[in-house]
């Protein structure tokens, strides 16, 4: 079968990556979609069961930090487009082992960029999927793409460092890069270390939702299909060398999120929902909110299509229908605390 475009997605078995890969495979039967993924703890092969036998889909298990493997892929597959999502994303773990985040998020990006630029086949686009956390937290000001990066945790710092690498390839070589910075993304198949599936899993186990500290933390939540639409739009209409925020106006305090999920799952009245929320010790510094502006992306024609009410209903139902998709809460990736979900995989 001859394909007229070959797309490499790194981290394509992760939460956002799997939704992107499925969308690409289903929308573009004439494209070859290659998924390069290490299959870390937060990835599941089950995320891609619906497409694993499709003729235009190829899975390669491997490490984006492995230059021999990455160079081989670029020198044999004639890659036209890269969506680089592979990353370590758990904020709590980034404080405990920052070197592993440096290796995957920064060195992995360096390896990928080098292989893509040196490949015989000319690359059309290199889309780097970053996060709103590179801006750092803000009490009131909403960040646009020109705002300075002031990351406040090791995870966000490595994403900002990787962005500088990506940007340097545009500045020095006019390599066709585009950067996206997303709000918190949620939806089916997200790992239980992230806040919404974590709360849902705790409630399924008849345990309380645990929230770090009592400060008024809130987050903007974007449904995963809207994020995927944004990535595909910048591929087709985005300008090379540019950065695009992928944000939503919907914002909810984390305590309110917990109470809302309690009411949906436990079917209790509002006055009793607070009894299912427990406050636990917080990190030394708590990032209260990450507001961003997305007018630049909207000028390309992007709009969110899934409301919070629709998206959270769909997400809750998926976790209720798939209780064994992820192991129960626990282990070494967050302990008893809720982790506010990050934007990338």
Image (spheres, rainbow, N blue to C red):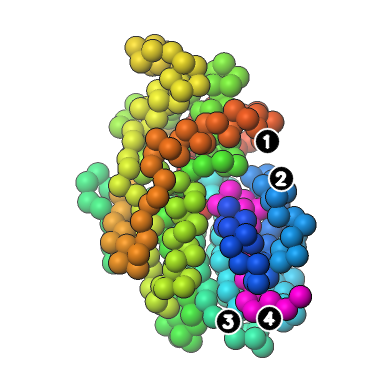
Where is mark 4, residue-wise? 78
Q: CA distance from mark 4 to mark 2?
A: 28 Å
Which of pointers 1 and 2 lies earlier in the amino acid sequence?
2
The reply to whether callout 1 and callout 3 are in contact (CB within 8 Å) is no
What percent of the width, then of the height, locates residue 343? Answer: 47, 51
Q: CA distance from mark 1 to mark 4?
A: 35 Å
The circle on residue 20 is none
Looking at this view, is 318 or 281 the one in front? 318
Badge 1: how crowded within 10 Å, few (<14), some, or many (20+)?
some
Which of pointers 4 and 2 lies earlier in the amino acid sequence?
2
**Which stretch is magenta?**
1-18
Badge 3: how crowded within 10 Å, few (<14), some, or many (20+)?
many
What percent of the width, then of the height, locates residue 129? Answer: 49, 62
Numbered marks: total: 4
The reply to whether residue 308 is in sight is: yes
The reply to whether callout 3 and callout 4 are in contact (CB within 8 Å) is no
Judge left or right: residue 68 versus residue 250: right
The reply to whether callout 3 and callout 2 are in contact (CB within 8 Å) is no
Which of pointers 1 and 3 lies earlier in the amino acid sequence?
3
Judge left or right: residue 260 versus residue 98: left
Where is mark 2, residue-wise? 46
Where is mark 3, residue-wise? 123
Which of pointers 3 and 2 lies earlier in the amino acid sequence?
2
Q: Is residue 293 magenta?
A: no
Q: Is residue 14 magenta?
A: yes
The circle on residue 325 is 1
What is the residue that sits farthest to the left in this orientation? 140
Judge left or right: residue 160 versus residue 55: left
Q: CA distance from mark 3 to mark 4?
A: 8 Å
Write down the quadrant of residue 25 in the picture. Answer: bottom right
């Amino acid at each position: 079968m001859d394909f007229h475009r070959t797309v490499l997605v790194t981290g394509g078995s992760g939460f956002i990556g799997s939704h992107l890969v499925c969308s690409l495979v289903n929308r573009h039967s004439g494209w070859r979609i290659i998924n390069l993924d290490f299959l870390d703890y937060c990835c599941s092969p089950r995320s891609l069961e619906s497409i694993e036998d499709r003729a235009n889909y190829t899975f390669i298990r491997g490490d984006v930090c492995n230059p021999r493997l990455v160079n081989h892929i670029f020198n044999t597959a004639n890659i036209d487009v890269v969506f680089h999502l592979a990353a370590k994303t758990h904020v709590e773990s980034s404080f405990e082992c920052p070197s592993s985040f440096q290796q995957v998020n920064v060195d992995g990006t360096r390896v990928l960029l080098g292989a893509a630029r040196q490949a015989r086949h000319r690359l059309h686009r290199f889309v780097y999927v970053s996060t709103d956390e590179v801006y750092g937290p803000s009490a009131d000001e909403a960040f646009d793409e020109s705002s300075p990066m002031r990351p406040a945790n090791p995870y966000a710092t490595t994403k900002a460092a990787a962005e500088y690498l990506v940007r340097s390839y545009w500045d020095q070589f006019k390599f066709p890069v585009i950067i996206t910075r997303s709000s918190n993304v949620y939806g089916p198949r997200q790992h239980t270390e992230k806040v919404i599936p974590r709360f849902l899993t705790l409630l399924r186990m008849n345990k309380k939702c645990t929230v770090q500290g009592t400060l008024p933390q809130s987050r903007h939540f974007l449904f995963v299909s809207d994020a995927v639409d944004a990535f595909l739009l910048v591929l087709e209409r985005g300008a090379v060398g540019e950065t695009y925020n992928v944000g939503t106006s919907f914002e909810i305090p984390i305590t309110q999120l917990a109470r809302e999920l309690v009411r949906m799952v436990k079917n209790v009245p509002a006055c009793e929902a607070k009894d299912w929320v427990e406050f636990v010790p917080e990190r030394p510094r708590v990032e209260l909110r990450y507001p961003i502006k997305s007018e630049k992306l909207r000028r390309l024609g992007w709009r969110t299509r899934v409301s919070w009410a629709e998206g959270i209903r769909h997400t809750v139902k998926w976790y209720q229908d798939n209780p064994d998709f992820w192991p129960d809460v626990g282990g070494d990736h967050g302990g008893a605390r809720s982790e506010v979900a990050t934007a990338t995989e």
